[in-house]
Amino acid sequence: MNILKTTTLGLALAGSLAFSGAAQAETFITIGTGGQTGVYYQVGGSICRLVNRGSSEHDIKCTHTTGGSVANINGIRAGDLDMGVAQSDWQYHAYNGTAPDTFPDGKFEELRAVFSVHPEPFTVVARADSGIETFDDLKGKRVNLGNPGSGARATFEVVMDKMGWSTDDFALAAELKSAEQAAALCDNKIDAIVFTVGHPAGTIKEATTSCESKLITVDNDVIRKLVDDNAFYAMATIPGGMYTGTDEDTTTFGVGATFVSSSNTSPEVIYEVTKAVFENFDRFKKMHPAFANLNEADMIKNNLSAPLHEGAVKYYKERGWM
C-alpha cells in the first residue's frame, strides 16, 4: 500500500473530523450587566436565560457579569465582553468620543447598538430625617455618588459639573455599589443615594421599606437646560405610590438602558441573541416589571446613537421591521 497515500488520507480524515468538531463546538458569550439589585443585572440574566433555552439549536451558551455602563463599554472595547447593557448617554459619548475623562481612548467607532430596553430615571432617595427636601439640598450632606465604572456614577458627575459642585461640597462622598447603598442609608451612614435605574428597582424598594425615606424631585433650570441640550436625556416621572414614603409623582430626568456590542462580535451570534429576545418577547416582558411596557418598534430605534449591529439588522429585516 502506498504509504504517502495512506498518510494523506489519514491527515484528510483527521482534518475532516477536526473541522466537524469545530463546527459543532459551543460558543460561549459574556454579557456585562450591573449590580445585583439593579435592573441591568436582570436584563443580562433574562437575555442569557432566553439564549440558553435555545442553545440546542444554535450552540451558544451565555453568562453574565456585573460591572456598569462605563465598565461594560470598556470591557467590550477590550474584547473581555461580547456585549453589555449601557445607559444611552454613555453609548453616545463612547461612540462619538465626547467624554474624554470617562473614555480617554477616544472614539469607540466599533461600538454597535443592538436594541434599547427600559427607561432609567435619575433617582434621588433621602432619609426622612436628613433635611433634604430639594435636589439643591444635597450640598453639605452625606451622599452616595455610586461606584466608579457605573453609568449612574458617571451621569451624576455630569450633573455635578453642571450644578457647579465637586465632591468637596458633600460632607461625605461615598462610592458604594448599588447593592450596598440601601443598607448604608438605613444604617444612617449616608443621608441620600443617587442612582440612575429602571423602576421598580430592588435597591430603591429596599431603601424605602427598611427605613423612613423618600424620593426627591430633580427639576431646576440647570436640569432643564441639560435635557434641552442633549437628545439622549429626557424628563421623566416616577409614579407616586410605587415606593413607600412617596405618594406623589416625582419629576426628574433620565436616560434609556441600551444593549450594545461591537462590530468585532460575530453577526451570527448577535442575530441569535436578538432572535432569542424577540421570538420570546412576551416571556421577556414578564421577567421584570421594568420590561412590562416595552414594545418592539421603540426598542429598535429609541436611544440608539451608535449604528445597529449587522446581526441585529438581519433579524429586524427578516421580521419586516426595517
Image: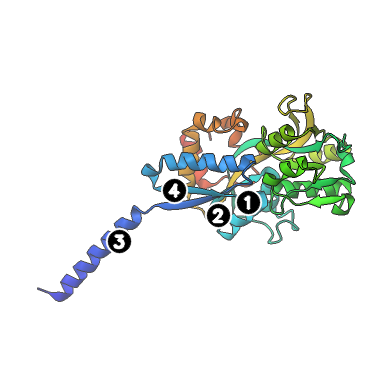
Report the coloring of the rendering: rainbow
Query: Callout 2: 10 Å neighbours few (<14), some, many (20+)?
Result: many
Per the image, the residue denoted by label 2 is 81
Residue 277: give its label: none
Q: Amino acid at mark 4?
A: Lys
First in sequence: mark 2 vs mark 3: 3
Per the image, the residue denoted by label 1 is 67
Residue at 70% x, 46% y: name it.
180
Q: Quadrant of residue 219?
A: top right
Q: CA distance from mark 2 to mark 4?
A: 14 Å
Per the image, the residue denoted by label 4 is 61
Q: Quadrant for the N terminus, please.
A: bottom left
Q: CA distance from mark 1 to mark 4?
A: 20 Å
Q: Amino acid at mark 1?
A: Gly
User: Do tag 1 and tag 2 residues touch (Cβ < 8 Å)?
Assistant: yes
Closer to the camera in the image, 7 or 120: 120
First in sequence: mark 1 vs mark 2: 1
Q: Secondary structure at mark 1?
A: loop
Q: Amino acid at mark 3?
A: Ala
Per the image, the residue denoted by label 3 is 18
Q: CA distance from mark 3 to mark 1?
A: 37 Å
Horizontal and vertical percent for residue 113? 59, 45
Residue at 61% x, 30% y: name it.
289
